[in-house]
Amino acid sequence: MSQPPDHPSHDQFLRLYAEHEVALHTFVRSMLPTREEASEVMQEVIVILWQKFSTVAEFRPWAFGVARIAALRHLERRARDRHIFDSELVGQLADESAVMSERHSDQREALESCLQKLPATQRELVLTAYTKGTRMVDLATRRGQTPMALYKLLHRIRQALLECMRRTLAQEETI
Amino acid sequence: MNHDWHDLIQRYIAGTLADDDALALQNALKSDKDLRALYLDYINLDVALEAHAGSREAVNEMLASPRTEPSRPLRWLSWRPLTAAAVVALLGIAWLWFHQTRVVAFDIVSVSSDAVPDWKKECRMRTNDLRMTRGTMQLRLSSGVTMDVTAPIEVKLIDAMHVRVLSGRVTADVGEHGKGFVIETPQTRIVDLGTRFGVDASDSAHTDVVVFEGQVELYEKGVAERVALLNKGEGLRVGSHRRASRIVSVTGSDELNAWSTQARPAESAVIAFVTDSMVTNDEGAKKWPSLRNFYRIVPGGLRDGALAFAEEIDQWRDVPPSLSGSDLVRTFAVDGFNWWMQMSVTVQRPCDVFVFVDMRNEVPVWLSQEFTNTGEKVTLDRISHKAPQRVANRFEFAIWKKTVTQPGEVKLGPPYPNPPADRKSFNPNRMFGVAAKALP
């Protein structure tokens, strides 16, 4: 049952959801093959979390449980599609994603400085590529590149960012 | 066959990986834990870049559009409460997601001239890192939360409802819309429940949290379980591994960031420090002490209308002119402790120490032996919480005095001579008041 918007739980829900949202999103994304599907499932998860929130004692484990079920249901619905990992691997990834959330949070924090270390044109490119509504084909055309060349460049940028984030964390751990 | 796993993972994430390669990736992931960690790191990067790009877009839109008045609530929301609740929640979440940003906008309410070059009052700034080596600044986040920061300080602004104080002292004044505002420090996470509170992370070994209005929740870093709820007039020093101890005295006026938990009073101050017998020596053994009240030392703070207690809104009235401008100690009352407590006031110059005692009470022996009744009085106005403009009751307090010729400690005993036989019929006033004035 939903609650009126001025109920104290509303604030509490927003606070808890905001605190765990990115970790939840990463968790869902780890189980699903595409960004769009992860967003779709997250919308479903938000509604379920809000509807059932008042009866919950511990938010985080419950929210991850809800997200896991929603992602698995989604995968079941499109089980015959190509490019989907089997349920054994999805289960492994979900388990490991849940315990890596602190490391991932630290990595996200390092992303800002890693982005700053990129040449400005590369930084602009990667953020434009991730902006909602951007189509790779259009972006490649605007840049006078083939889509394949653009994909390869983005791959290199992401790899550089990931290595930077991992390196930053490793340095912090040794201090 | 050799695979470029970085390439395969990225193509899988982008949805462009061919079936055969996807199968090869799946088999490798199942048997290789490090590869799964790499895959999950890429997933995390993908989500983070999406969020980052989204927040950048939000900032760009904000810069492009003029400020608008808050719109009226949509009419249909009022007659479809259930749907409205979900919509309001989703809008709130969308707002938080939209603003979950590394670049946070804030308005400068005031700034000292030595703080940051080119930062001026009423300017709107956008940054996620706030570092100051000099000066003070008051800023207002888009959530309505006002923060006072005093250099040296290093703060990371996560979003309008969440900041990380890496070092330094911050006071947050959280309006109605800022409820749920979070300050993180290296030792703890503080969630505001609609209040005004201070955080001092100047010392890397611990964080001091003091509450001036309302309540805050304390959480251990990385743990969802609340470890303490602090009320107005309470403070804790939080160290690592959930160690915490009571903050016994806080010095400073009521200016937003003019407080300090450090025992380094200004040279002009008369009272240097206050403590009591309720401080446990073995702080480690008592990780979260149940008594968390602090004494507030206000240099030169005794005047007509001065707040009398650290956790209440009662006021001292009819202050004799000879005492006006004395250093004031706002005490607190905790039944069950008052009967046996001893207080210690450390003064750093020759002075008169004054104790205000409720005239309805029997005079404690320690007071009559060591202090002199001046014959003067001060009035305590008990203020109604429901109607703060209304005085609910007035009580007269006798002013007792002790002249101290050398800097040092002055011991005070309990405010009541004996615990009452019948607590129900006894309605004592609160703690005594304490003040000190330098000798001419």
Image (spheres, rainbow, N blue to C red):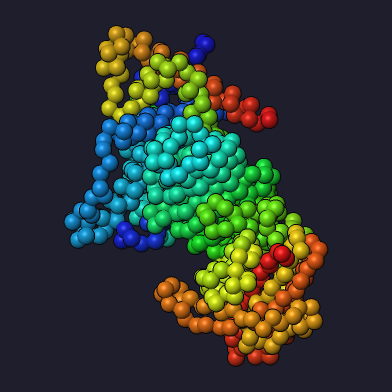
Side (left or right) of B345 relative to B428: right
Query: Toward the viewer: B424 or B367?
Result: B367
Q: Nearer the viewer, residue B229 or B352?
A: B352
Q: Is residue B320 above or below residue A66?
A: below
Q: Is residue B223 above or below residue A153?
A: below
Q: Residue at x 36, y 62 (%)?
A: A7
Judge whether A146 appears above or below A5 on screen.
Answer: above
Residue drawn at (38%, 45%) of the image: B142
Q: Is residue B163 left or right of residue B210?
A: left
Task: Give the image quarter of residue A122.
Answer: top left
Residue B17 position by quadrant: top left
Q: How many marks?
A: 0
* Residue B92, image x, y percentages: 34, 48
**Res. A151 in view:** yes
Q: Residue at x 51, y 41 (%)?
A: B112
In which quadrant of the rendered image does the C terminus of chain B lie? bottom right
- Residue B45's spot in the image, x, y percent? 46, 28
A47 or A139: nearer the viewer:
A139
Residue B274 visible in this rendered orientation of the protein: no
Residue with the most extreme front position = B440
Q: Position of residue B249 (x, y in %)?
A: 66, 60
User: Which of the two residues, B184 or B368, is positioned nearer the viewer here?
Assistant: B368
Question: Horizontally, is B233 left or right of B177 in the view?
Answer: right
Which residue corresponds to the image point at 42% horizontal and 40% vertical from the top-left? B121
- Residue A160 in percent (x, y) is at 50, 18
Left or right of B203 on screen, residue B4: left
- In the rendered view, tell whether residue A11 sits above or below residue B368: above
